[in-house]
Structures are given as structure tokens and as C-alpha cells.
Image (cartoon, rainbow, N blue to C red):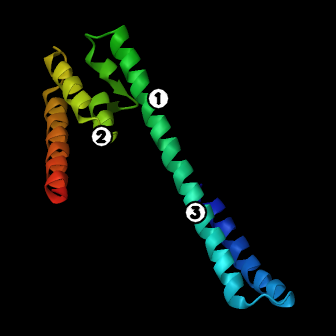
Amino acid sequence: MNYAATLAVMVVLAFCFPLTLRLGAGFGVSQTITISVLGALLTFGLALYLVRWQVGRHQQALSRMQKARAQILADPENPRSYFVGGEHLGALLLRLDRRREAAETIDRYARLGGARESEIVALQEALSRANRRQRRAQGREA
């Protein structure tokens, strides 16, 4: 949702809120109940929007991952086939919390002749950070 649409929704909500309170009062519903119901509806709507947004992002990441894998199968010796939309498949896998697959992908990429050393180092550092976060999280759970 862009800025103008967000602003439009806020204006409509600001306009409708007092009208809803008056309408509820006209029917004998207390202001507290009306505010509670409107708050619950707003919370439900926000939760619905956030869940749909997260699912959409996850599906987009999965489709990009499948596209990258197809590129790698088509041309496994080309270092550029490991990139989709400027993002390396290893970084995408790390973002999806698939560290084992990311490590294998980064190792295969590092063995390629045309792979850039700076990209390899950056990917290995990202993998190392993800592993440290995982160990820290496991240490807190135990």
C-alpha cells in the first residue's frame, strides 16, 4: 500500500469513528463497547493485512529461489546464474533460514572459476552470522 492510500484510509477512519460512536449512542450502545468493537475490528484488519503481506513476501522469495535453481541447472558453470534480481541464491536461502542449503550453495559458488572473491567472503560472513545467531538462540533455550 502506498502513502496516498494509507493516508486515504486514515482519513476515512478518522471521519467514520465519531459517526460510529454517535450511531451507537443512538441505538443505546455505550461508548466503551463501541470503541472496543472498533478496536477489535481494527486489530483484526491489521493482523489480516500483515499476515497476507508476510505470506506474499515468502511466496515471492520461494519463486525467486526456484528461478535461481532453474538457472543453475541450466548453466551450472556460470557464476551469474546464482543471482536472481541482484540477490545471490545463498543470501536468499539464509533469509529463508535454510542454512545447510545456503552453505552448500556458497561452497559450490566458491569453487566456480568466475566467482568474485568479495561476493564469496560476504556470503561466508553472512552464513557465519546466521550460525552464531542460531547458536545463541539455542543457548538461551537450554
Between the C-alphas of marks 2 and 1, the distance is 16 Å
Q: Amino acid at mark 2?
A: Asp
Can you give x and y, in whole percent of width and height, for residue 105 in the image?
23, 24
Residue under label 3, please give it: 46
Q: Is residue 135 above or below residue 41?
A: above
Crowdedness of circle 1 by 10 Å Cα count: few (<14), some, many (20+)? few
Q: Nearer the viewer, mark 2 or mark 1?
A: 2
Q: Which is more N-terminal, label 1 or label 2?
A: 1
Which image quadrant: the N terminus?
bottom right
Helix, strand or loop under label 1: helix
Labelled disc at residue 63: 1
Helix, strand or loop under label 2: loop
Crowdedness of circle 2 by 10 Å Cα count: few (<14), some, many (20+)? few
Q: Amino acid at mark 1?
A: Ser
Can you give x and y, in whole percent of width and height, for residue 96 in the image?
34, 39
Which image quadrant: the C terminus?
bottom left
Residue under label 2, please give it: 97
* Towards the viewer: 92 or 142: 142
Tell me the residue at 53%/56% (across/down).
50
Between the C-alphas of marks 1 and 3, the distance is 26 Å
Q: Quadrant of residue 37?
A: bottom right
Q: Residue furthest right?
A: 26
Q: Is residue 10 above or below residue 64?
A: below
Q: Quadrant of residue 65?
A: top left
Tell me the residue at 44%/32% (across/down).
62
